[in-house]
Amino acid sequence: MAKTSSIQRNKKRRKLVKRHATKRATLKATIMDQGLSMEERFAAQIKLSELPRNSSAVRIHNRCELSGRPRAFYRKFKLSRIALRDLASQGQIPGMVKASW
């Protein structure tokens, strides 16, 4: 089980990303617009840098919903490989069976 502080920190990042998503998108579009003057683009760059660091989507780390494990994460199920195997063995995931040969 991962530390609860790291799980909570990641949840906080997800909330910040959701809150600042539209603002970040408009500022990035302004920065990339070649038709604007350099001063306007630079001002948008400064406003973007003033936003919280954790409001950037690249700072989110995918974690297992059950255990908080940061590695071996399956995006489709939002679970780690260990939790996925346990749930599949119990029959909790429809259509998934443990391979045996």
Image (cartoon, helix red, strand yellow):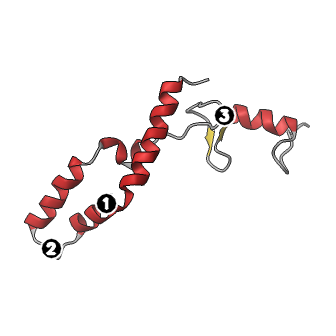
Separation of marks 2 and 1 at Cα, in angstroms: 18 Å
Compare marks 3 and 2 and give the one earlier in the sequence. 2
Instruction: Give me the residue at 30% from left, 42% from top.
Output: 53
Q: Amino acid at mark 1?
A: Lys
Question: Disc 3 designates what residue?
Answer: 66
Residue depth check, mark 2 versus mark 1: number of the one nearer the observer:
1
Would residue 80 be found to the left or right of residue 39 on screen?
A: right
Separation of marks 3 and 1 at Cα, in angstroms: 32 Å
- Residue lying furthest left: 39
Instruction: Give me the residue at 45% from left, 46% from top.
Output: 15
Residue 94 % position (x, y): 84, 50
Compare marks 2 and 1 and give the one earlier in the sequence. 1
SS type, badge 2: loop
Instruction: Give me the residue at 39% from left, 47% from top.
Output: 16
Separation of marks 3 and 2 at Cα, in angstroms: 47 Å
Q: Amino acid at mark 3?
A: Leu
Instruction: Give me the residue at 57% from left, 33% from top.
Output: 71
Would residue 11 be found to the left or right of residue 71 on screen?
A: left
Q: Compared to 4, does 101 lie above or below?
A: below
